[in-house]
Amino acid sequence: MIPLKNIKYLLIVVFFSLVACKKVITLDLSTAPTTIVIEGNITNEPIPYQVSITKTVGFYQNNTFPNVSGAVVKITDSTMGITDSLVEGKAGIYTTSKLFGVIGHTYLLDVIAEGKEYKASSTMPKQVTLDSISFLTTAAFGKFNTNAVVNFQDPPGVSNYYHFIETFRNIPPKQIHVFDDRISDGRYISRQLFNDSTIIHRDTVDVEMQCIDKNVFSYLEELSGQDATNGQPTSPADPTSNITNGALGYFSAHTTQRKRVVFQ
Amino acid sequence: MKHTLLGFFLLLILLPAISFCQQTKNKFTISGIVLDKETGESLIGASVGIVGQKGLSTVTNSYGFYSVSAAPGHYQLIISFSSFKTDTIEVELNKNLTMQINLSKSSALLEEVIVTSRRKSDNISRPIMGVQKLSIEEIKNIPVLFGEQDVLKTLQLLPGIKSAGEGNGGFYVRGGGADQNLILLDEAVVYNPSHLLGFFSTFNSDAIKDLTVYKGGMPSEYGGRLSSVLDIKMNDGDNKKFRFNGGIGLISSRFTAEGPLNKDKGSFIISARRTYADVFLKLSKDTSINKDILYFYDVNAKANYKLSDKDHLYLSAYTGRDDLGLGSIFGINYGNLTSTLRWNHVFNSRLFSNSSLIYSNYNYVIDITAGTNNISITSRIRDWNLKQDFQYFINANNKLNYGIDVKRHSILPGNITASGTSSFNDVNLQKKLSLESTAYISHEWSATPTINITSGVRLSNFSALGPGTFYTYNTDGTTKDSSTYSSGKIVKAYTYLEPRFAASYKLREDKSIKFSYTRNVQNLHLLSNSTGTNPTDLWIGSSNNVKPEIADQVSVGYYQNFKNNLYEFSAETYYKDMQNQIDYKNGAQLRANENVENELLFGKGRSYGLELFLKKKYGRFNGWIGYTLSKSERKIDGINNNQWYNATQDRTHELSVVGIYKKNDKWTFSYTYVYYTGNAVTYPSGKYTLNGQVFFYYPERNSYRVPSYSRLDLAATLQGKKTKKFDSNWSFSIYNALNHANAYSINFQVDPNDPTKTQAVKTTLFKFVPSVTYNFKFL
């Protein structure tokens, strides 16, 4: 929906940017017991698909996350009744060998890692065609900001959940762009992918559109909600995962389309 | 239950008749109003007593009315009110008398030598607890942000009342939420008490006469919110002569005009304030800046007219709006509109009646334009309220307050109107109607010369009404059932009895202990994702899914005055138990959601604390020290593994020091110092990676604390030459004079200079903010 939660923060930041000052501080943050993080994707793109398993680290440790090796990872296409045992290549990365991602099929993930079993299920939704990428430049308080706009027709009468991944100028993605058609059902949708950094002349912009299922949407939405750059959630909490047994992360069967545009 | 309610109402209506029968024989009554001699403003809370007759004293009500009864005889009536000269009047009481009393203002310096009067030790003898009063004089001398006098921020300097954040008009009382405060302006509920996203309060102090806050032990005439009552009364206006005054500040200007409608019969006052940051924006040549909008305004207006010696009419109105806009992309416009029509009628020297018709409205409109997307979101809460109050002065030792109050709430939760080319559909959520009816009775009794007791009860009924479709939900969040109700049909009704009890026991003339018990029930709940007040917060009523919030508070206190009532000390402890507290599921969709009640989680809360307060009331130097030690916790099903956790409002220590020093007739200096432990807050206890991005791990709710907060503000007022016609002053202030970098927010992010690290970034808003205001008065 409209990023209303950001508005107050945005306004405050803009109004008081003259007086506000920012400083890096060191807080006494404790390190919670290590937790397993699972990320698995099945798409309608060519095989293979991967599941990665990592662990949490302390806030003030480096951003290198321990891989979890030696796990038993299986994915079952429950529509077809085929089970694929994934093979660990690079440490912590498990790859499929015989499954194909098919729209409408439901996939079950089963992971046994470090003595605990984790399960998840996801159904690949129908694909909604991404028509085009355009650009929109807006101005506020003396700053011009150009964002990419995704254009597509939302199919009426069904719930759709969208996830966009945008990259340009090799800036690592910071924002999670997810929304549903709760208040857009059947509309022709043109939505800006709001970003911290503006797109500039001659930037090559890559956009990946994923049609995701409801649980993955909730997960990503909650994840984007706790992102501090997106505003100030009162009490951030870990998103509700579709994986059982307390694992962080998600398992998603989704469709993927990609488009590349140059901003002229 | 309906019959009980009806019976209770009937009893109340019959009460005057019953009580007439027991009129004490052989006694006469003196009654009337107490006024400011200079302006004709009625004085609220002035003390009227009979010299040498212990226990024969009373306090004027919110309209300045008093009533004292005594056996026939010759008496000396003593009338006193803070910052006014105490007056004594000889009376020959051989029949019921009506007497208007005019008090004249005293200079603050004089007061030191005034003989102590009963009024000044009222804090000892009256069984009222958890009550704080601020005088407008105090508010005017206390430094605040940008030099804007602000009652809500000054209030936060009192023990037990905590700011919801830097520069935030939202406040927490005794561990309750910002929505658990009942904020009344001339009896009308003000739903959003702040401007500019919380940085300024909606109350223009030029328009305010009296301000009382109840942190506990509320009299039974008040109810509807769990934590506190903030009762603000507007000025009536000068009924002797026309006056104009105003102020020019850095961010806003104020102007007030007042005068008689018909000398001594009636008066009016109109007071307005507007900020002008937008005027500067307009000066910019940059087209993206000069299209931005940023202002708010307030208008308070009031008129009163004395129809006869027994009848007085008052009409008051308030409106205030904020208009904020970023170019043509985004705009939000929000504000309150309240009006109150009141009729005072004196049935006889002992029975005072007030009838009120009250209207209150809060709404917002958001407009968003992005490319082809044009949408506007509107939301509104509107109340119509009919209220009848009686005050019956039975005899010197007994007083009854009773009345009824009926409110109709209508809530438009937020509709979306989209243009044809928009990516969004129109959303029209059902309007929610409800009826809140209450009847109350309260008995003030001076049982012995040392024991005073106020006991009362409030019977409240809340009915969620049709038309509309109402849903019930399964525990897994799916819809269980829906039923459609036609117009006026009761969907769900809740009836509660709210007992109120307070007693004081005087240990000595200047020492007392007090006890109180209060139950409050709240049927309107604010759904908010932010810590303070947000213009777009959503109010919902109790319903088939949402139960009323209930709080039971017990409080014990010790009170002592020193040095002839020059110093006042109090120590109060409280324990508050809260039921049906509301929180949200992860990722709750609070907007444009017909099933918003399905996004809620329920649980309980408890808070307890100790509040110490020492005040020097008069003299060249006056001020106070407040200290609060407290705890506030919640236990909500579905949060923090259903374990108790610290509420966001939880702060262990809070200290505030306020000093005002009048050096001479020219200069007045003042300072405030505030220190408090940071709020309980959720910070990450680790991090992890997904899809190449770093995310933070939040296993526990509110297990950390924001760094502690401290701030020193300074102010100086330079009085200009005072002539018969003109009076002016300059007010200079510095907010956060010690330049302390308090945390407005703390964000967690990947270090932009070293992607292998993450960091915590503190944002500080106001460091050393000087300001100047020029105030003037045409007399």
Image: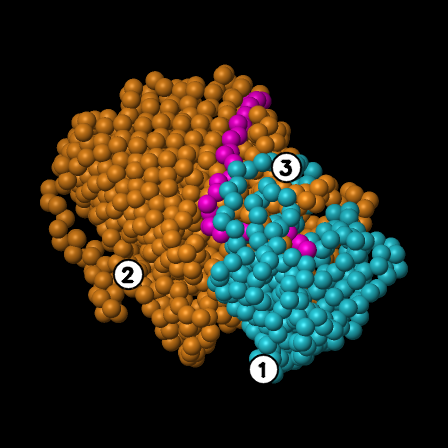
At label 3, counting other C-alpha atoms closer than 10 Å, the crowd grade (few under 14, some 14-19, many 20 or more) is: some
Q: In the rendered view, would you say A184 is above or below A221?
A: below
Real-space Cα separation, disc 3 to disc 2, in angstroms: 51 Å
The chain drawn cyan is chain what?
A: A
Outermost residue toward the top in this view: B664
* The quarter of the displayed image where residue A211 is located: bottom right
x and y, in percent, of residue B11 in the image = 20, 61
Depth check: give the residue in front, B11 or B715: B715
- Give the residue pinned by disc 1: A81
> Label 3 is placed on what type of residue?
Val
Alpha carbons under labels 1 and 3: distance apart: 53 Å
| Chain B, hue in figure | orange
**What residue is shown with label 2?**
B496
Q: Nearer the viewer, mark 2 or mark 1?
A: 1
Chain designation of label 1: A
Residue sitting at 51 percent across and 42 percent down? A30
Q: What element carries label 1?
A: loop
Q: Is residue B736 visible?
A: yes
Closer to the camera, B703 or B497? Answer: B703
The residue range painted magenta reads: B692-720
Q: Is residue B240 magenta?
A: no
Identified by mark 1, the residue type is Gly
Residue at 52 percent of width and 54 percent of height: A35
The amino acid on which the numbered mark 2 sits, given as a three-letter code, is: Tyr
Q: Residue A24 carries which label?
A: 3
Front: mark 1 or 3: 1
Locate the N terminus of chain B and report the quarter of the image it occupies: bottom left
